Image: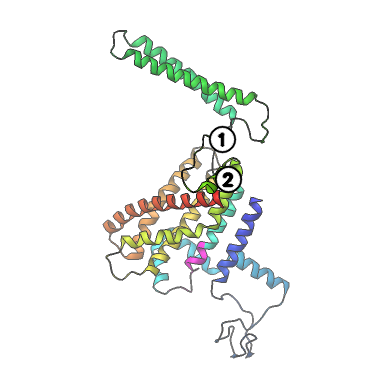
Amino acid sequence: MVDIEATGGLVTGGVIAGAIEKPSGHAGEAHAGTCSDCGQPVSGNFCAHCGQPTHVHRSLLHLGEELLHGVMHFDARIWRTLPLLLLNPGKLTREWIHGKRTRYVSPLAIFLFTVFLMFFALSFGGVEPIQSQSLDERIAEARTAVVESREALATVQAETPSDTPGRAGIVAGAQGAVTGAEATLRMLEEAKTAAPRADGLAPGSWQASVADSVHDGRVTIGIGDKKMKEKILHKLANPDFALYKIQQTAYKFAFLLIPLSIPFVWLLFAWKRGFTWYDHGVFVLYSLTFMAILTMAVGVFGRWDGWFPDTLVGLLMLSVPVHMFAQLKGTYGLSIFSALWRTAFLLLFCVFTITLFLAAIILMGLTG
């Protein structure tokens, strides 16, 4: 179900991205005559009045070519846009703002397509939204914790003189750690030997813990009216379904990151003349596109084990402030110092924006 909807989203994103682009590519052989759309005289590859190609294809092969272009957005502009987006985002943003646009994919088109492609890719092989260890791994860690806590208690009892002030409290704390570790181990071992649950959830899993907390009344919702609270609790009682709804909501409303981000970029230049809200919008669109590409890369490498993928993921995460700095400096013609302090504030604004976006997505996902 998720994969089908993700595929549909990919196609939809490609169609939207292609729809908002101006006609380009090869129109076929030019011929004299009139335009089949508006009826105006034509003498080249495109109608000078409405822009339609003068050679109208009606073959099944051309239908496939249109689908390939619409979904994959596969023309020469993408190969000029992507390298600049990744390596010189300031130049790309500045040239688009200043009107050099025919050679590049528009910021809105590439953003839409990349976001849909990101959700499509992550639905098949990305990082799981909530990673959880297997029950056997958790039991092994719990046993290690029990051994370590007992050793710590023995060390405290042996090395702390009986006349040490507060010794009783220190020993009691160590004993409490042992008791807690043993209780955790006992709970996990009971979950491993428990009979299958009626709701089909794996005993000891995070889904089972959330469902049990809801059923036992240990989850309190502090927002909304009674009907909204009941709707949220009903979703949380089925954690996998709740997570699915949140994922789908994030996929559908990813565009909200644009209006949420633009005002913060404007704040960085509120006292400087010569920059418009449009300029900031182009900056945000190209920046969010880079973040979507980065998320896909982290999702792919995050599935691998070993020091090399871990190191690569770390380097990819470090590229975020570097890319922001380069884009700010190149787009707005800033000095190194001006770009540095704006990058620092922009990172803080990003944390706030993502937090606000996630809160809205979770709320809409659980109440929708």
Q: Residue at x 64, y 55 (%)?
A: 5
Q: Earlier in the sequence, mark 1 or mark 2?
A: 1
Q: Is residue 113 left or right of residue 263?
A: right
Q: Which residues are magenta?
A: 100-111
Residue type, mark 2 in image: Ala
Q: Residue at x 50, y 62 (%)?
A: 111
Residue marked by disc 1? 206
Considering the numbered disc 1 on the image, is that residue within a helix, a strand or a loop?
helix
Where does the image place residue 114, in percent across and percent down from the top left?
A: 53, 59
Residue type, mark 1 in image: Trp
Out of 137 and 175, give the one closest to the viewer. 175
| Dot in front, 1 or 2 | 2
Q: Residues within 10 Å of mark 1 (few under 14, many from 20)?
A: some
Q: Residue at x 43, y 47 (%)?
A: 317
Where on the picture, by quarter, is residue 207? top right
Q: Is residue 258 positioned above or below 232 on the image?
A: below
Out of 45 and 253, give the one closest to the viewer. 253
